[in-house]
Image: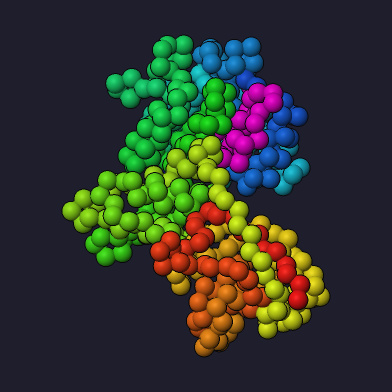
Amino acid sequence: MTRCLLNIDLGELPGEDEQLYALAHLANIACGGHAGDAASMRRALALCERHGTLAGAHPSYADREGFGREALEVAPAVLRAQVAEQCGQLAALARERGVPVRHAKPHGALYHAANQSPRLARAVVDGVVAALGPDVTVVGPGAGALRDAARAAGLGYAREGFADRGTLPDGALIPRGQPGAVLTDVGQARENTLRLATGGAVDTLCVHGDTPGAVSLAREVRAMLDALEQPPEPLGDSALRLVLPEAVDRSLAREALRALPGVRDAVITEAHACVYFDPAAPPELPALALTRLRVAPVARVEHPLLRIRVRYDGEDLPKVAERAGLSVEEVVRRHAAREYTVRCVGFLPGFAYLGDVEPSIACPRLPVPRPRVPALAVGIAGERTGVYPFASPGGWNLVGTALDFTAFDPTRGAALQLGDRVRFEQVRP
């Protein structure tokens, strides 16, 4: 594990939200000790497969009544057998689906007891290996008996921190049942994530699937980890380029970045945001400014819908139809049937890149651009479509001509702004 991953304890509760599996990098699946049965394990494995989540075992003391959160007096040999049985049940069901189980994390009281006792730690590790084999990673505290036992057995080990748990001054977790032990505030989870993920002492962060508001917490943590995973690229000494998450509203991203102290401007491109700042006051972790936009869909703005009348008379229209194996009429119908969004504005003043074109009619740029494309020509290039605001060189496939449309006005600027919605309406000759 070379980056900080989000792990979530799952398969524990009825009606568990599927979003948790989509947000987790690692799913720790309850396998019968404290919770879970064959049906819940099958569902969890199916959701891991659907969302590309790495499946792992979450064994516990055999304590369904206490949810595995009470330390029990269990002989190491018995504990080894219990852990092997639980992990083995999950592994058998996983083999039915062809889903690998490559990590294991003890649950609750066993997690802490095994980390304090070398004998219990060895029993847990031996049970895990007996069921899952030697090619497995154990998830546990940053230091202690569990880590030592895993390493002695030649296993991988991932140091864990907790986004949704409070800590004592010495760094230990506040015991459950005490004030501040379980964090449900997204802001506190955000602070924990930033502190732990940038501190270099953990490989993975946990959100418990049974924490109230787990989906919101996990969404926040995952967004922050994704942002931290892709640090900005310096462009000289006064600019940075950031990868722009697909789900972020482009206009809100620009405003969020412009609002950072020291930032002079932010320019949005197809896949990146370029931030220009005062070299004397570079912004700290600008990528984190985008995470709030990813986890707060209510912040999305309602962008206007602009309808552009088009006469489909472009010289490349027959070629686009031939490439798609469709009639010209069907290409026109599919182009006009879709609602597009302004992904970025550039190349020429007012030139809006609109996405996404119906995949069946997407067509690559011309290998050799034309020296002159007429103003208001409507073109397709890959998955984008757009209207040329002025006569210019260009390599897009021309499919039509926009009517009664001014893409750029010197006094008002571009007619289409980031996030605006566009529909094309066919005008027949």
* Residue drawn at the location 60% of the way across and 57% of the way down: 306
Indicate whether residue 28 is drawn in magenta.
Answer: yes
* Residue drawn at the location 34% of the way across and 50% of the way down: 258
Q: Nearer the viewer, residue 21 or 306?
A: 306
Q: Is residue 177 above or below residue 143?
A: above
The stretch in magenta equals 8-33
The spot of residue 336 in percent (x, y) is 71, 64
* Residue drawn at the location 69% of the way across and 59% of the way down: 338
Give the left or right position of residue 408, taking residue 361 as reference: left
The spot of residue 421 in percent (x, y) is 59, 55
Give the left or right position of residue 207, taking residue 423 as reference: left
The spot of residue 215 in percent (x, y) is 56, 31
Q: Is residue 340 above or below residue 374?
A: above
The spot of residue 250 in percent (x, y) is 48, 53
The quadrant where residue 42 appears: top right
Indicate whether residue 343 is drawn in magenta.
Answer: no
Q: Is residue 53 visible?
A: yes
Q: Is residue 7 visible?
A: no
Q: Nearer the viewer, residue 226 or 68?
A: 226
The quadrant where residue 76 appears: top right
